[in-house]
Image (cartoon, helix red, strand yellow):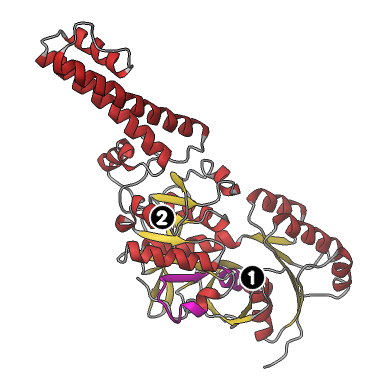
Amino acid sequence: MESRSERFLVIGASNVARHVRESLQSCGYEVVRLTAPSDGDLREALASSYQAIAVVTHDDVLALRYALTTARVQSTTPIIVTMFDHTIAARLRAVLPQSFVTSPADLAAPVLAGSCISEKLLAVRHTHGRQAEAVAVSDRGPEEVPFQPIRRPLWRSLAVRSSGLLRTPDTGTRMLVFGLAGLLAVIAADFAWLLFGGHHSAQSALLDAVRVVTTVGPAPEAHGVYAVMSALAMLVTVLLTAMFTAGLIDRILGPRLVGLVGARVLPHSGHVIVVGLGQVGLRLCRELTALGVDVVGVERNTQAPGLRLVRALRIPAVVLGHGDDRRLLERLGARRALAVAVVGSDDLDNIATAIVAQTVAPAVRVVLRAGEHGTLSDTGTLLPLGVVRDVSALAASYVVCWMEGGRPRSVVSDGNSIWVQTDCGTFLRRPVSKSVETPDNRSLRVGIGIGTVDQ
């Protein structure tokens, strides 16, 4: 391999940083990598000059600290920083004009969204207004194709929004709905009995029916079968009232992430179930929602930071639970879904969820996020898990292209190759590193979706 004179510095312990280092080295560049440097280690490394510097970490605050220290020592060297928080990223751009800030989640979301919508799309992203850009694969490689955001008929939207009570996802809400339905059923039955069988006036029948439901008792003149049925109805009402009250309290005090009516109800069909609401999951939900696709988010951690951003990002419905829970997937309509996107940060959890999703809905496309530990790459050679997209490799290819002097616009993947789109619209194939370090420092083989099967 021909050695080149350019020298690069990569800072970070993430898999993206490892991919960046290995990709640059495979191209013949000299690369210095610092995983978790102290201030002294960083200043010592910055004593040398570099063609470009990459700060690639999972911690935005740590990335900000490294970027500021680096810029103070080498004020003219181009710096690329990966950050998830847009507020911090905007501030960093203002403070350090020589820096370029990008987000692995923002880069991966269009790729994952394209795989969710159609197996023919490599990526799709919304632009301003109701416009969208899509990239599809052809014999000549990736090419931009027209894409119209999904627009559902008004009657269907109204039908879905008004029928949310029939698709309640959590136990508390089901108790509230069942208790309320039971109380209304008792009132209706008692009212009909008195109105048509007891020849009461409508006003008198309604009053006596309400007396039974509130366990005040039937009318004093009640006797015979009606008196017995009223007594049984009052006993049942005690249980129904307890269920309704418990569900109502849970609804008021708990996180209200799914609506009973309106825009936040669970969709009926043609939706995408996104499992894992970390940075990648939130960006994917936002992208799909902007494209007109109904989304249901699933998050198992009740204290997840992303839950606070659900409403701000206008994500319609979010359910608290485990994505590998078969009953939960069935209640969320996995069989009628457009796709199930498993985008958690743990490869092993993603594998478990993908297997359950394929069992529940074998005809539905499963899209998986990979790249954190390399587990999916090895497992995918033995078991078809769905459409696998390596988020770390996508981000690394984008970063490497920028460090080499290119001005990348986006990055796409078909599961076997990665292309970076330049600012002029051309797609350039990028080499992919062949190994990745796991947390226990073992080396695993890596391919981008090796052995996977598109469902």
Q: Position of residue 56 (x, y in %)?
A: 69, 66
**Mark drawn on residue 299:** none
Callout 1: 10 Å neighbours few (<14), some, many (20+)? many
Residue 362 vertical placement versus 374 (above, below): above
From the image, which quarter does the N terminus lie in?
A: bottom right
Residue 134 in view: no
- Report the Cα–Cα distance between label 2 and label 1: 26 Å
- Give the labeled residue for mark 1: 16
The residue segment tinted magenta is 378-399
Magenta stretch holds residue 256: no
Is 242 in front, or is 317?
242
Circle 1 SS class: helix
Residue reaching furthest to the bottom: 1
Q: Is residue 398 above or below residue 262?
A: below
Horizontal side of residue 380 vs 34, given as left or right: left
- Mark yes or no: residue 449 visible: yes
Q: Is residue 384 magenta?
A: yes
Percent position (x, y) of residue 446?
Answer: 56, 80
> Residue 195: which quarter of the image?
top left
Q: Mark 2 or mark 1, which has the lower sequence index?
A: 1
Q: Amino acid at mark 2?
A: Ile
Q: Nearer the viewer, residue 368 or 204?
A: 204
- Residue ID at (37%, 38%): 174
Contact (Cβ within 8 Å) of mark 2 with mark 1:
no
Q: Would residue 275 appear left or right of 168 to someone viewing this image?
A: right
Question: In front: mark 2 or mark 1?
Answer: 2
Q: Amino acid at mark 1?
A: Val
As drawn, 160 above or below 380: above
Q: Which residue is mark 2?
A: 273
Does residue 381 appear to the left or right of 102 in the view shown? left
Residue 22: quadrant of the picture: bottom right
